[in-house]
Image (cartoon, rainbow, N blue to C red):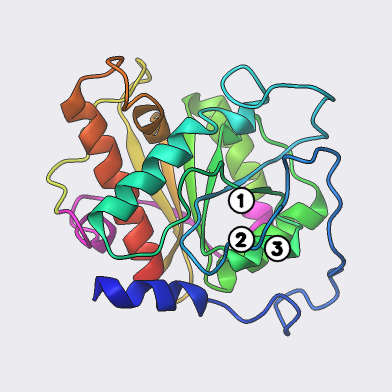
Amino acid sequence: MLAALGAMALAWVTAPGAASSSPDRPRDKVQYEDPRLGESKDRSDKFTFARVKWGGPVIPGEELGDRGPFWSHDYPDAGLHFAKIVSELSKLRVTLDTPEPIFRFDDPDVFKYPFVYFCEVGHMTLSDEEIAGMREYCLRGGFVLVDDFRNPSQMRNFMYYVKQAFPEFDMKELDVTHPIFNCFYSIKSLNVKQPYDRGKPYFFAIEDKHERVMMIINYNNDISDFWQWSDNTVYPIDDTNEGYKFGVNDLFYALTH
């Protein structure tokens, strides 16, 4: 089955120019203010870990990563390490040793990539075009891994934009019996250790009308922090391995649903 997943990943949605839920949205190539953003090369022939940014332009010369804008936290090490793990665990063709492409949700190129990472959403701002793009991306088969946010005020900020994008869908809490926790690894408990003292971690989802998870939401958690530091001794190896298990399950759920 795993050998076939690479082909499945390429056929996940209709082409960006095809009819969609928002036919009047512009399809021109998005021009970014920073050459590190967008797509320097089309890598959609392989599984490519991709990230979505939010907020205004990057300040010229601003560093991306933990010292940079919130949306770039854990870049690029988390994505590089996660891609390597996926390559070693499966027969997927994977883009390796290249920092992930970074898109806005109003960029048509994001539709080439069925799985995107979206973090620090407790601080995010989205334009109307980005909200429409997020909705279209998810309804056309895309999967969004939302990570690294905490406390009720950040959740309120996140939900403000989610309800604009998906007014007809509610966020639901997942338990360990959900297929997403059993599609590659069999995860036994959701009471996992998180990198910081943020309270109990929760796993929520936004599902479409067919009950497919379009967006998994790691609240009071930051699984990509475990990925980022997995080549270091910052966290115990058992905690790092658990962080990878959740990410791998998310990915293979996304590619098979």
Q: What stretch is highlighted in magenta?
A: 162-185
**Residue visible at 31% across and 27% down?**
230
180 in the magenta segment: yes
| Residue 257 appears anywhere in the view | no
The residue pinned by badge 3 equals: 109
CB atoms of marks 3 and 2 within 8 Å: no
Query: What secondary structure is found at the residue carrying circle 3?
Result: helix
Comparing 173 with 84, the one in front is 84
Measure the C-alpha gap from mark 1 to mark 2: 6 Å
Disc on res. 86: none
* 229 versus 15 height, above or below: above
The residue pinned by badge 1 equals: 162
- Closer to the eye: label 3 or 1: 3
Query: What secondary structure is found at the residue carrying circle 1?
Result: helix
Instruction: Give percent across and percent down for residue 160.
Output: 65, 43
Comparing 107 with 137, the one in front is 107
